[in-house]
Amino acid sequence: MSEKIERDPENYPTGAAQQSQIAKRHRTGSLGRTLFLLATASAVIVLTVLLLTIINQSFGLTAVQSEVPEEVLVQRYNDEQKQSAPDLDSLPKPALVAILQEQISRGLGRRLERDQRFFEDQLVFEDPVLWQEVCASAEPSAGCTLPARSQENVVALVQERVVVPTVVESWFLFDSIFNREEIILEAAEKYPDAELVFRSWMTGEFVASPQSSTPELAGVRTALLGTLWVIAITMIVAFPLGVGAAIYLEEYADQEKWYNRVIQTNINNLAGVPSIIYGMLGLAIFVRALESITSGAAFGVVDAGKTANGRTVLAAGLTLALLILPIIIISSQESIRAVPSSLRKASLGLGATRWQTIWNHVLPNALPGILTGTILSMSRAIGETAPLVVIGASTFITVDPSGPFSKFTVLPIQIFQWTTRPQSVFRNIAAAAIIVLLILLVLLNATAVYMRNRSAKKQGQLS
Amino acid sequence: MTDLVENHNGKYAVETRDMNIYYGAFRAVKDINLQFKARRITALIGPSGCGKSTVLRAFNRMNDLVPTSWLEGEVFFHGKNLYDNDVDPVEVRRRVGMVFQKPNPFPKTIYDNVAWGAKINGYKGDMDILVEQSLRQAALWDEVKDKLGQSGLSLSGGQQQRLCIARTIAVKPEIILMDEPASALDPISTLRIEELIQDLKKDYTIIIVTHNMQQAARSSDFTAFFNMDDDRAGYLVEYSVTNELFTSPQNELTEQYITGRFG
């Protein structure tokens, strides 16, 4: 150690050469940094544009034309009764029923009355004798037993059957803000009777209404419930199966054995298989081969009137579970592998069994990572459309799914279906449905992230 | 060697007969014949790669965790070969505890670190008393008694290692194996661990692997020197009372090693 360490002038640069060599290395570094910044910036820009586009389409001015304008009805009532009711909502029930009697056909009125009566003590459209017969028959109408319609209910009926507001044209948000004058002129010229109203397509009513062929009345409830049902089944199946397989492959399987390596390779490849192929698989297995199970016939719970022939929530959930299973397995394996082996040794060294070691030390430490993978795969499953189209998800359905054996549709399919409609108003509600889908995704992810952080905190930081 | 043959109780805590350990086709250690006295400290020393840690892990079947490893010969514990088919490694590991090279407390509270092993092994007594006893025995109680609810990872390295010792003691093993327990610690923590090992000798048989020859000379009663043969298999060169081995080694290799001429 006593000999002096000589610098090697021939092989290492010195002086100015060294300076420039270092400067060059720094330049490479800052070039890389700039590129990464640009990559991040373009991602942010693309996301912002996407969000703005959706918001742009979900709000805006609409030209609403009514068959009988609301003001006309109110004005007529005020003139006749010497009242000064400001709008339809404040009219009394008898006046509203009178409007209905005047404006709608007797046949429609009778149908409405059989659904639910207008008054407890009198019939409006129905013949009393006939009413007695109907109510005494084997299948009495709902109106025989239900209490009478409320005032709000009748207002809604007048809106729906008499006023019939129709959006004849809609404009996007930015247009509505910056070209307001032009739009007003254009609307006045093209639709002299129409009223220009600013409308948010994404409303509570939109979320709560079922699908409809009238865009103003259509909502996403059916699709939203379908998505929730499908994703629930997907997670119930895929999470335990995926984590279980990951535990087996990491903790028990002998990686030296050829068959375990084959399994591992196949799982890795399955994660990259296009989703439409899973749709074919789901169609062949869950919809066709296992129809008696997925339709509920095997359990005797199939709804005779609404049989879905295996194209049910259950078949969709199982198909999506297959689709995300490889992703969950791989990400769980990664996080199980990342648990330091010193922990396993410490546990086994105390006389713990392998299972006690896995349950008490490996899994709690791997859980945050496992949940991260699960969040990602759940987001993917929610957005998946192609395999569900293949297994025959309904594109138009107004009945809410009531269980695993129901027909269903999901939000992405609903959105796709709306965007293909010719009427421009459907594009507005498609955008609103996208907002619902995004909010749902954010909510589910936030829940999962919260659970992950809580488990990470509970477990403490590994050092 | 005479001192080794006679034993106060006429019984050894652990004894190996013609023990060979393989990793796949590779023989890691060969023909080990060793007897360990109860309630004594035995140090295993030797150059890197000579298989002393492998020998140590043979006593609580930790080598089983390496799927390719297998053992030839016998390891007797209470007159029973640990590698007989009817021996459950889970039971072996409870009765032969282990402290590892790097402190590896569980990412749990200090209390749970000590209590967990006892709990899974079906301890029925008062857990608070057991935790306190174990931490006292590991000379850690005074430092942690006010923060038993904090994470074991919040302690310093030396404290973490004593926590690991407390955790091992809590399941009441008969033998404690230590694999270079102080090599990742600073000199003061090392000294504390050495003192602790001396205290534990009253109740436990201790087998310790160490790279530090001063440590072996200071703290052990017996020392076994291993070396690596030309076929890279470790073998036992000399086994003797520590004082004798360090002052008058019988084997030339031993002398070279303890005087620092190789290894």
Image (tube, rainbow, N blue to C red):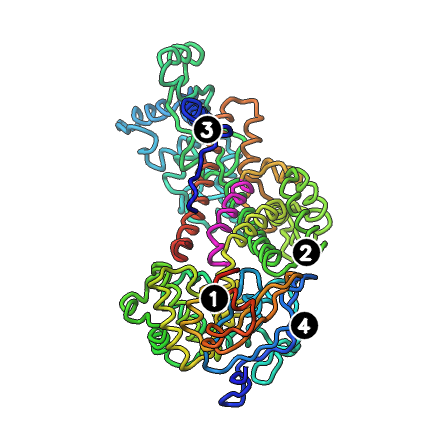
Describe residue A235's horizontal placement relative to residue B198 as left or right: right
Q: Which residues are magenta?
A: A360-382
Chain letter behind tag 1: B
Res A36 label: 3
Residue at numbered disc 4: B72
Marks 3, 4 in one chain = no
Q: Is residue A375 above or below residue B11?
A: above
Q: Residue at x 32, y 23 (%)?
A: A75
Of B261 and A342, nearer the camera is B261
Quadrant in the rendering for residue A204:
top left
Please name which of the two marks, 3 or 4, marks the residue nearer to the observer: 4
Identify the secondary structure beneath mark 3.
Answer: helix
Q: CA–CA distance between discs 2 and 4?
A: 22 Å
Residue at numbered disc 2: A256
Q: CA–CA distance between discs 3 and 1?
A: 49 Å
Chain letter behind tag 4: B
Q: CA–CA distance between discs 3 and 2?
A: 40 Å
Residue type of the residue flagged with mark 4:
Glu
Identify the secondary structure beneath mark 1.
Answer: loop
Give the percent coordinates (x, y) of residue A376: 51, 43
Queried whether the magenta region covers residue A366, the answer comes back as: yes
Marks 2, 4 in one chain = no
Please name which of the two marks, 4 or 1, marks the residue nearer to the observer: 1
Give the percent coordinates (x, y) of residue A139: 57, 51
Residue at numbered disc 1: B210
